[in-house]
Image: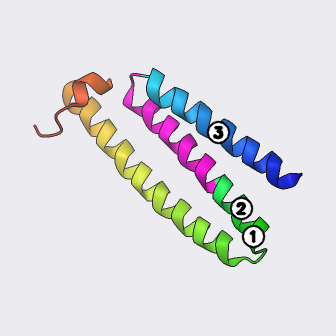
Amino acid sequence: MILQLLLLVAAALFAVGLYGTISQQPIVMVMMGLELMLNGVLLAGGALWWWLAPTTDGQIVLLLVLAAMTVEMAAGFAIAVLAHRSRGSDMTDSATELHS
C-alpha cells in the first residue's frame, strides 16, 4: 500500500510540474515546474528502489542525483537572473537567444 501511495504522489508531482512547465511564461516558473517533475521522478525511483531492494544504496544514489540537480537549477536561475538584468524581461519568448 505504501508503494502505491508513493507512486501516486510522484505521479501527482510530475503532473503538476508538467502543467506548470507548459502553461507558464516566466522562466522562473518554468524552472520550478521542471524541478517538480524531477522531484516526482526521484520520488518514484526511490520508492521503487526501496521496494525492490530495501538497502540504503539506492537512496544514496538518489541523494547524489538530487545534489547534482540542485546545482544545475542554481546555474539555471543564475542565467535567468542575468537575462532579466540585461534585457529587463523574464519571459521565455524573449530568452530565445542567450548571447548578447
Which label's residue is closer to the chain start, 3 or 1? 3
Q: Looking at numbered disc 2 in the image, what kind of residue is underneath it?
A: Leu
User: Which residues, given as a range, are shown in magenta?
Assistant: 25-42
Q: Residue 39: where, in percent of width, then height?
A: 59, 49
The residue carrying mark 2 is: 48
Residue lying farthest to the left in this orientation: 100
Q: Dot 3, crowdedness within 10 Å: few (<14), some or many (≥20)?
A: many
Q: Residue at x 47, y 57 (%)?
A: 69
Left/right of residue 28 with respect to residue 38 in the rendered view? left
Q: Dot 1, crowdedness within 10 Å: few (<14), some or many (≥20)?
A: few
Decide which of 37, 68 is in the foreground and name it: 37
Colouring used for the render: rainbow
Q: Residue 18: where, in percent of width, then height?
A: 52, 33
Nearer to us of marks 2 and 3 is: 2
Q: Looking at numbered disc 1 in the image, what kind of residue is underneath it?
A: Leu
Q: Residue at x 68, y 36 (%)?
A: 12
Decide which of 78, 15 is in the foreground and name it: 15
Disc 2 versus disc 3: distance between alpha carbons? Answer: 16 Å
The residue carrying mark 3 is: 13
Label number found at residue 52: 1
- Quarter of the image for residue 84 reads top left
Label number found at residue 9: none
